[in-house]
Image (cartoon, rainbow, N blue to C red):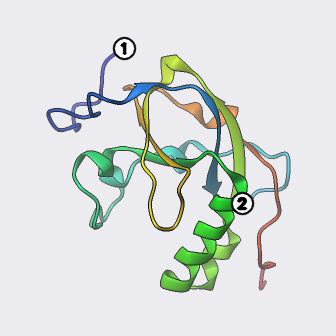
Amino acid sequence: MTWPDYFPDGCPPQDAVAASGTAYRLCLKRAVGGIARAKEFRPHKLFPDPTTGKAECHRCDVSLDDDLQNLLKLRQTVADKVGRHYLKRVPAVGDLQPEWGAMKLTPSDDSPTHRSLWLYDGVNPHESFTVVAEPEVPDED
């Protein structure tokens, strides 16, 4: 397996390990039991406007969390910064596989159980992630 061409030298970091374990990710609104979408596992580096405060290597990762409650707290923290619409994101859970890439625990003030996942080129783990909770706010349609 190879890393994508857009990864900078030294990315992922040398202390990253093969992906494994159960992890959670916030996804766009889906029904409980629904499958995450491929675009929800794109790193910030590939967004149309990739401007973030993250270091270059971390712009190439996919953010996950080992703990559902910490992920939900992080969702609230982000919603307080960017708007209530972020509360419509729902947690999905999946079991990480070594053939997907490398991971590293990257705790923050918002979540001590946050981890970064760097995916090998061409890997699409979304079908292994299932939505486990409803959004915090209902649709306003």
State which quadrant residue 95 falls in: top right
Q: CA distance from mark 2 to mark 1?
A: 33 Å
| Camera-nearest residue between 17 and 1 | 17
- Mark 1: amino acid: Met
Task: Give above or below for 88 relative to 3.
Answer: below
For this view, does 30 lie left or right of residue 71? right
Dot 2 crowding, Cα within 10 Å, few <14, some 14–19, many 20+: some
Quadrant housing the C terminus: bottom right
Q: Residue at x 61, y 37 (%)?
A: 126
Task: Give above or below for 56 relative to 110.
Answer: above
Between label 2 and label 1, give the one nearer the viewer: 2
The residue wearing badge 1 is: 1
Q: Secondary structure at mark 2?
A: helix
| Camera-nearest residue between 42 and 22 | 22
x and y percentages locating residue 28 in the rendered image = 65, 60
Q: Is residue 28 visible?
A: no
> Is label 2 in contact with label 1 (beta carbons under 8 Å)?
no
Q: Residue at x 23, y 37 (%)?
A: 7
x and y percentages locating residue 27 in the rendered image = 63, 56
The residue wearing badge 2 is: 69
State which quadrant residue 108 falls in: bottom left
Q: Secondary structure at mark 1?
A: loop
For this view, does 13 lie left or right of residue 138? left
State which quadrant residue 85 falls in: bottom right
- Mark 2: amino acid: Gln
Quadrant housing the N terminus: top left
x and y percentages locating residue 65 in the rendered image = 58, 49
Task: Give above or below for 37 relative to 82.
Answer: above
The mark that comes first in sequence, 2 or 1, is 1
Q: Residue at x 32, y 29 (%)?
A: 15
Task: Give above or below for 21 relative to 61.
Answer: above
For this view, does 104 lie left or right of residue 75? left
